[in-house]
Amino acid sequence: MAARTSADVKAARKRVGTYLASKIVHAGSVTEEFIPYDEIERAWTGHDVIEAVLCVAELSTDGLERIRKNFLRVLSILIWINGTECLDDIGNRMVEGRDLPFKDTGLPAGLDSLKWLEDPLLRPKFQSLQHIFVPATLCESSEVQDINKDCRLPFQEISEDVSSGAYGVVDKVTIAPFHFFTRHEEHTNQGPKIVACKKYHSASSLARHDIERELYNLQLLKESSTSHEHILIHLTIVHHRGRHLILLPWADRHDLDHFLREGKDHTAKQIYDFDKWFPGVLADPRTTLESICRQMRHIADALKWLHEGILTHRANRNRVYFAHMDLKPDNVLIKRDDISSGPSKVGKWILCDFGLSAFKKDDQLNTTQFSSMQDYFERDLSMNTPARRAPGAYQPPEVGGPESDNITTLTGAGRGGDIWAFGCVLAEVLAFSIGGSSFVHDFRKARKGVHKTDYFYEKRANLVASSAHIKKTYQVRPGIVKWLRELVGTASLPKTLVSCCVETILQLLETDRESRPKSSEVQM
């Protein structure tokens, strides 16, 4: 092979540099821009690219492999900072069989680790610009992953604010290839990985308490020795530049609230093509109701899994009991269902958002006051669990609120509140099964009636609210009962099927918490 001229070497280095520059993600953002590793690999792919850049005639197959596995990032940084003499030196080392002065595994590097760069002026440039080539690698874990403020997150694409809540927003994020390690695999993602990224607003002291609560709840669920496929478990929690980010599997069919609106958001903006995502759902009410009931049965079972307690992998192996406390259509995600036995026409429904969840640990050092585990469960999970937010449409009478005549001491929500909320959601999905989003709208209108709120309950007239007499104080709004019972005779579905659903809903919407069915007793 003819000797390489300086012009050849210079041209080869320029080609690599130009390619890398064209692949910068978030270009122009000094603190965010980075180059994904798969693009770094491509920059060095091709006949004799490495030899040309290093100004050597030919390298052995082993030598080339050693560079590809251990040195592509370092070489790229050297091209970026115009470290020509270093590149020449590396070429000489390879020809002479000497060790490489530094490896990619040493990145990101501090100044003390860069003394192999003979030109002292290159060291601060290398240190400053290396982060473009070394975005953080995220790992699935129950522990919070702290990432240095100088590192960039490997988010290749970001669709901001795809949904929002009281304390934060959710972005749709694409993690660049080779930048996410799964828990049970020894390799990173080979292609782009789409996830949901929940980030919090600036927090008040109360909000910070709820954020800390959510982070802890998520860690407990992640550490469970069992799992439930209809409960969303986060991938990892990242702490970066003073903010916590929760990464979760992406639900590609949005949530139940959008479903009940036939693909629209609360402003009536069309978010997706409902008939394309859920073909046949509006055309066949009977099979739709069957599919919906099957998914609601899964949600009921997910609540049972939470209510009956989970064992964590921690050393003390305590059983932890959960109550969700904020079950509503927004907190039921929907994913495309691809099961081999036949996909669900309404997708796969998954319970999410454990920011409000109450939990109680089975402290084995303090069980003598209870005669059984059931006593502990009944007392600790169902009592004195204050609501973390203002009452909402799907929360039970015991939470209090405008309809409760301003009760000052809020009684517990707990698992009984989950059962009430489940009945509320079941009523809305029944309405949808029969008449689509227009029926849901009619039901919500009937529910609100002349009231200021759209709660499912109301205060009985001429009675003083008392936490000890919830059943006597409150009732399910008559407009709801009337609307549901009229469905039995007017719906185009078998009367027995609709009647069964209505009676189940009314059993769940029991204003006396103690008389409601347990999650293990919910029959769908």
Image (tube, grey):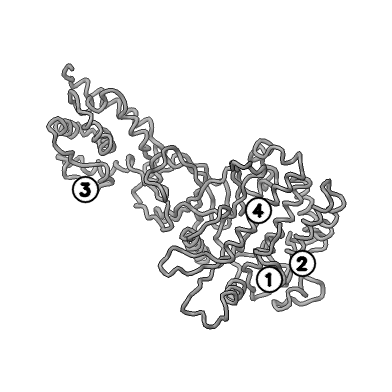
List x then y, in percent, for residue 88.
Answer: 17, 30
Q: Secondary structure at mark 3?
A: helix
Please say if the residues under marks 4 and 2 sit with CB atoms less than 8 Å apart.
no
Which residue is denoted by mark 3 in the rendering?
111
Tell me the CA gap for discs 4 and 3: 52 Å
**Is 76 placed left or right of 459 in the picture?**
left
Under mark 1, the amino acid is Glu
Judge from the rendering whether residue 39 lies leftward or rightward of residue 496; answer left or right: left
Residue at 73 percent of width and 63 percent of height: 508
Q: Is residue 257 above or below residue 210?
A: above
Along the polypeptide, which appears first: circle 4 or circle 2?
Answer: 4
Where residue 210 sits: x, y (%)? 52, 64
Are the residues tagged 4 and 3 within 8 Å (C-beta)?
no
Earlier sequence position, callout 2 versus callout 1: 1
Mark closer to the chain start, 2 or 3: 3
Q: Viewer-proximal residue, 487 or 458?
A: 487
Q: Earlier in the sequence, mark 4 or mark 1?
A: 4
Say what amino acid the circle numbered 3 marks: Leu
* Residue marked by disc 4: 329
